[in-house]
Image (cartoon, rainbow, N blue to C red):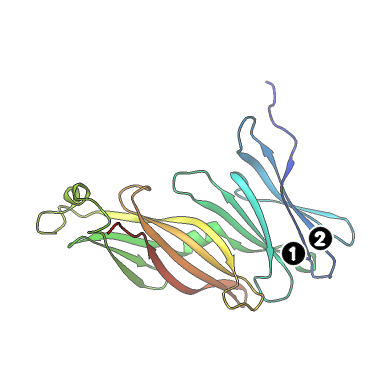
Amino acid sequence: MFDYRQEPQVVAFAQGDVTGDGVMDNVYLTGVHTPDSPFVQDITLVIQDGLTGRFNMTPLSDGQGYDPTLFLGDFTGDGVSEIMISIATGGSGGIMTEYIYSYLDHQENLLFDGNAYNEAYQYQVTYLDDYKIQVVSESNQQQYIIDISVSRDQDYLDDIYNADGTLISPISGWVNPLSGLYPVDFDSNGVYELLAYQRIAGQYNADSFGYVLNQLAWEDDAFVLDQQSVAIFGSDL
């Protein structure tokens, strides 16, 4: 059978000192484009040491998707850039695959794995009486109450609630895995924190009420939750 596979190509590039030796290094993402599609497979992190010219290659565990990007910045406060990788999965939920690697002193270290994050940050979304939704963040035992009486039309509400505002039957929603991960230097000290977006969904993905926003900061040897909030969509007056 004819093999339609192509040779790997560079799909993203960035330059910065990721080894800590003061010399600029070249950082690439390579991958194989699917014919007649923007879909990329076999995405691999490639680091070329600026001093020696040697290459280090790291295949990503979830190395496929759309529009892979690189960002270099100091997330740990050691004065050396880490490598942030973002890949769109292309699903209806806008879910992203995210990694952050350190390559200090030529030692590869995975600092952030989006799959591990999704496992650690779990939520419950429950419809309540009186046109409310409760979002519970299990990791830090916080709850958020969203009033849906003004953001949903009467037909939507009538399918779920009795005339007196009580639920016809129990109903739940969910919070998606990572919808976006953004480097932000909140305190302007040259060290980036992470702002993670996760979509709150009701009965289906497009039935969205807003996002859980988790601000993560590096502490000791891991990214930890620094602040959490819920951003909701507005409605017409």
Residue in the picture at 31% in, 53% down: 202
Residue in the picture at 64% in, 40% down: 41
The amino acid marked with disc number 1 is: Tyr
> Residue 26 at x, y = what percent?
80, 56
Q: List the single residue furthest toward the front.
A: 237
Left-right relation of 30 to 95:
right
Q: Quadrant of the N terminus?
A: top right
Residue in the picture at 38% in, 67% down: 137
Q: List the single residue furthest toward the left.
A: 164
Q: Quadrant of the C terminus?
A: bottom left
Residue annotated with mark 1: 103
Left-right relation of 24 to 216:
right
> Residue 93 at x, y = what percent?
44, 48
Whether pointer 2 and pointer 1 mark residues with C-beta atoms closer than 8 Å, the reply is: yes
Mark 2 burial class by Cα count in 10 Å: few <14, some 14-19, many 20+: many
Which label is found at residue 25?
2
Q: Going from the N terminus, do you reach mark 2 or mark 1 first? A: 2
> Residue 84 at x, y = what percent?
65, 60
Q: Label 2 vs label 1: CA separation? A: 11 Å
Q: Nearer the viewer, mark 2 or mark 1?
A: 2
Left-right relation of 49 to 84:
right
Q: Is residue 139 visible?
A: no
> Residue 232 at x, y = what percent?
36, 62
* Nearer to us in this view, 234 or 15: 234
Q: Secondary structure at mark 1?
A: loop
